Amino acid sequence: MQFSGGKRRKLRLAGDQRNASYPHCLQFYLEPPSENISLTEFENLAIDRVKLLKSVENLGVSYVKGTEEYQSKLEAEIRRLKFSYRENLEDEYEPRRKDHISHFILRLAYCQSEDLRRWFIQQEMDLLRFRFGILPKDKIQDFLKDSHLQFEAISDDEKASREKDIIASSPSLNGAILESESVYKIPFADALELFRGRKVYLEAGFAYVPLKDIVAIILNEFRAKLSKALALTARSLPTVQSDERLQPLLNRLSNSYTGQDYSTQGNVGKISLDQIDSLSTKSFPPCMRQLHKALRENHHLRHGGRMQYGLFLKGIGLTLEQALQFWKQEFIRGKMDPDKFDKGYSYNIRHSFGKEGKRTDYTPFSCLKIILTNPPSQGDYHGCPFRHSDPELLKQKLQSYKISPGGISQILDLVKGTHYQVACQKYFEMTHNVDDCGFSLNHPNQFFYESQRILSGGKDIKKEAVQPETPQHKANVQKTKDASSALASLNSSLDMDMEGLEDYFSE
């Protein structure tokens, strides 16, 4: 792709040429785009793609994938953001072009670390699964061919001759289902997972796979190709980083999927130092709760902890004067000389408030920044407990927070699946006794504000308190309602999050 500062000059393509460019509503993204686009369009396409993938992630947590509710909500989001999603729709060139280019832009942003790559691949796989699920059967073979997948649907005669063997190898199939189900002949090496589970019929080096099972194979192929492509893209990053127009945007994009920054505007001076101990147990997220506890016990935090906790306190309303008093009092309790604090530490506190150095008014760390940067070492207390704690230590910590055994199991399962923010969101629900928090958690300060809103009566709390030993069970109707609320909150959060990107180009 080439970039220019002005508006993109639209390509004049006839109908057949347009259709040939993007024959399907989904693709494996095998060929990168080669047209010229403006930096403004580059930005807009990237922002919309981030919104789409975040919606995919949020819906995957709120609903069971593949259910009618999940399908309808995701289709609505794809339509809203004007991406391609169905075959045989009129004027699909622009949505498919948008889908193609935006995918490759995000490759540049999300190839920069293992965690970013993992998140990007998972969301892209879920999006492909949805699109393949609604692909008309008469289009599947063309899609497989265009994706360079050597999967061939066998004829009805071949299927009839192997009917008993195919049914015997696929327990969920019977004659009636198989009659209407397509069966694909694929190389044995591409069906190893099914072979290991003894769920596929093999003959002469080929596997005969029903349509319902081929989805997993297609997704594995897509994962492998995308993972390799991201690795190759990462090796090419130095070339991209040399372009001063793109690198700042790509860095911000890779940090944008977790939500907005929280400033202190409107909150300054709203809490007193006497309230902090009480607030830490009621409304602090676990990352800040453990920092506060360590500070009170040790009367000291290392630089990473001071930065993470200090900016959080600034974000919830601590003034510069309060911050200086708070840290000085605590460090003096640790036998630090007041003059040493004034000389060695007060400058950094004033610097974080924009009163020293470059006068940059720093904002609190987002969940993504805490999860992906500056991991804690021995003796540190910063970072994300769900990301950086040993599972057994995390379990003990949750027990000390009076989380029920069933709740701890749910949280640990989410952590095992690397859903760290969702695990924190589950912790929020359990500690605030709500069925579903109704928002997508992206920021420690968001955790604090939502907690205060609930505790002050801004959100209904369940009338009957659940005993600590009783696991939470969600009603389907309530879940649907709250998930819709969560998606609306997500869209609002992402819109605000992207303002920084838009500001970057308007400067």
Image (cartoon, helix red, strand yellow):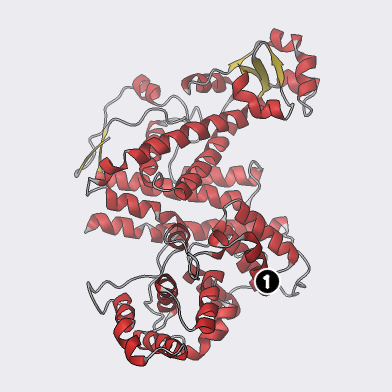
What residue is drawn where x is 41% and y is 58%?
A: 495
Q: Is residue 37 visible?
A: yes
The vertical placement of 32 against 203, above or below, is below
Q: Residue 305: x and y, percent?
A: 44, 72
Q: Is residue 472 visible?
A: no
What residue is drawn where x is 60% and y is 73%?
A: 459
- State the quadrant of the C terminus: bottom left
Question: What residue type is disc 1 on?
Answer: Asn
- State the quadrant of the N terminus: top left
The vertical placement of 457 against 340, above or below, is above
Q: Residue 45: x and y, percent?
A: 35, 44
Is residue 3 toward the left or the right of residue 471 in the image? left
Is residue 378 toward the left or the right of residue 482 in the image? left
Residue 301's quadrant in the figure?
bottom left
Q: Nearer the viewer, residue 464 or 431?
A: 431
Q: Nearer the viewer, residue 338 or 24?
A: 338
Say few, some or many: other residues with alpha carbon within 10 Å of mark 1 (under 14 / 14 to 19 / 20 or more). some
| Number of numbered discs visible in the structure rendering | 1
Residue 71's quadrant in the figure?
top right
| Residue located beneath label 1 in the image | 433
Q: Residue 185: x and y, percent?
A: 63, 16
Q: Residue 379: x and y, percent?
A: 50, 71
Q: Nearer the viewer, residue 229 or 483?
A: 229
Q: Circle 1 sits in a helix, a strand or a loop, which is it?
A: loop
Is residue 391 toward the left or the right of residue 264 in the image? right
What residue is drawn where x is 77% and y is 25%?
A: 173
What residue is drawn where x is 39% and y is 41%?
A: 107
The vertical placement of 298 against 185, above or below, is below
